[in-house]
Image: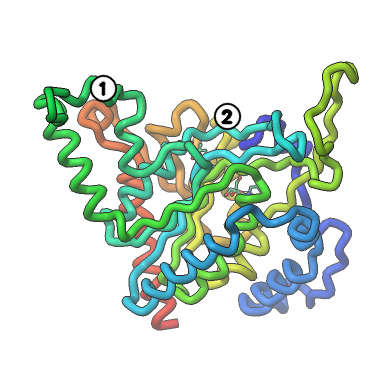
């Protein structure tokens, strides 16, 4: 989540609207879905964002890669998971020297990508440039020069690292064709790419799964209000005024990926709010699962809420799980795969 509190920043997509809906008791599920789509379509805030903020560099090439990846998958009836990972930046200058960042190392996303691949999914990994990546994350913090042995005319992996590196390299080689890596830096890059990827995934219908683990800023400075050059300290103390970012989950769920199975994350720091805030998010956007996590326990505890069960489901790692190297993402992905199986089966029969 962004470092500024959400309570003062909550953005009401539909505030001020006079809904011309029939009385609540007379509306069917279909009417409600239709109304939500209409409201997202009419609401200008997310459209204005894309009008005001230019698309990122290499956008068209990246979208073409995604299109080809999804077309191949659709032909083979493969499932595809879009995993978003890492934090978005909000630049303060057009020629950016300074920026505001959102917290996320990319552990959740990169670990989950490996488990989705192992579960048979193809994965589009939309990640913050230089944040943790699937497979490579296991090498972060290790010194490569401690792992190799250099003899005259011959460089090899040291004996004590051979098993570990060999296993990792084998897994990576097996999955590399199933993994499409797309990177972003800024909030605007991320939102442009999220929309385009979701739209290209429509070809997959219910075979598509969106797993939104990226930490997305709620506040930003529109390009037109950003100074072109580095802000000078000779101008004295700096006051910033940030605009609210429209909540993109609304058009994502109704317009860009209407048939995909969509999971979002909710990050909180106060445990007493976790379940309530996760349920609020689900009721607001009507997607499929919200996974709540707390900043300090996110590696061992999450809570899953969906619209069918009034009670939240918990996943908690025990000390012995942690000691034996089990990662919570393996259990999250197992759980979501069963839910996606059910969703896919219902879609085919419904
Ligand atoms: O990478 P790690 O260090 O392992 O950390 C993982 C994590 C804690 C970052 C991850 O598990 C997590 O909780 N990610 C979501 C954090 C977040 O940004 O929550 P939020 O309350 O701001 O957003 C909730 C949902 O709304 C998200 O799905 C987000 O994509 C969406 N959103 C947010 C802003 C915005 N303008 N539009 C949106 O649709």
Mark toward the viewer: 1 or 2: 1
Residue at x-position 38% and y-position 61% = 339
Mark 1 neighbour density, 10 Å: few (under 14) some (14–19) many (20 or more): few
Kindly identify which residue carries mark 2: 269
Work out which residue is located at the far front of the displayed protein and give it: 153
* Picture coordinates of residue 118, whole percent (x, y): 26, 54
Locate ligand 1 by image quadrant. top right
Left or right side of 184 for 229: right
Q: Is residue 334 above or below residue 109?
A: below
Label 1 element class: helix
Q: Residue at x 80, y 55 (%)?
A: 52
Q: Is residue 42 left or right of residue 337?
A: right
From the image, tell me which residue sits under label 1: 145
Q: Residue 150 location in percent, x, y?
A: 16, 23
Image position, residue 234 (x, y; %): 87, 16
Instruction: Mark 1 and ligand 1: say if the CB distance to the nearest ligand atom is below 8 Å.
Output: no
Q: Residue at x 51, y 32 (%)?
A: 294
From this view, report whether residue 111 is shown above or below residue 256: above
Residue 12 image point, x, y percent: 78, 52
Question: In which quadrant will I find the C terminus?
Answer: bottom left
Image quarter for residue 58? bottom right
């Amino acid at each position: 989540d962004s470092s500024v509190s959400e309570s003062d920043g909550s953005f009401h997509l539909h505030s001020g609207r006079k809904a011309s809906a029939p009385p609540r008791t007379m509306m069917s599920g279909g009417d409600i879905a239709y109304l939500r789509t209409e409201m997202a379509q009419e609401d200008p805030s997310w459209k204005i964002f894309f009008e005001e903020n230019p698309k990122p560099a290499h956008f068209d090439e990246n979208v073409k890669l995604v299109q080809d990846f999804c077309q191949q998958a659709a032909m083979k009836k493969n499932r595809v998971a879009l995993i978003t990972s890492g934090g978005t930046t909000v630049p303060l200058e057009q020629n950016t020297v300074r920026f505001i960042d959102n917290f996320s190392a990319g552990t959740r996303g990169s670990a989950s990508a490996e488990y989705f691949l192992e579960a048979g999914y193809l994965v589009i990994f939309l990640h913050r440039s230089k944040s943790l990546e699937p497979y490579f994350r296991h090498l972060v913090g290790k010194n490569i020069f401690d792992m190799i042995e250099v003899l005259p005319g011959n460089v090899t992996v040291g004996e004590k690292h051979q098993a570990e590196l060999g296993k990792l390299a084998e897994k990576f080689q097996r999955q590399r064709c199933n993994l499409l890596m797309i990177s972003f830096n800024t909030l605007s890059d991320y939102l442009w790419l999220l929309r385009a990827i979701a739209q290209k995934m429509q070809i997959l219908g219910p075979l598509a799964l969106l797993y939104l683990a990226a930490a997305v800023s709620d506040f930003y400075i529109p390009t037109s209000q950003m100074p072109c050059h580095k802000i000078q300290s000779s101008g004295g103390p700096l006051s910033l005024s940030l605009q609210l970012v429209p909540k993109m989950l609304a058009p994502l769920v109704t317009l860009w990926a209407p048939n995909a199975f969509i999971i979002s994350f909710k990050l909180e720091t106060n445990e007493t709010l976790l379940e309530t805030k996760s349920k609020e998010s689900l009721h607001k956007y009507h997607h499929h699962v919200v996974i709540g996590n707390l900043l300090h326990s996110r590696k061992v505890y999450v809570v899953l809420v969906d619209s069918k069960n009034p009670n939240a489901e918990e996943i908690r790692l025990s000390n012995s799980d942690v000691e034996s190297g089990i990662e919570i993402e393996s259990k999250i992905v197992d759980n979501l795969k069963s839910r996606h199986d059910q969703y896919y089966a219902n879609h085919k029969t419904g």
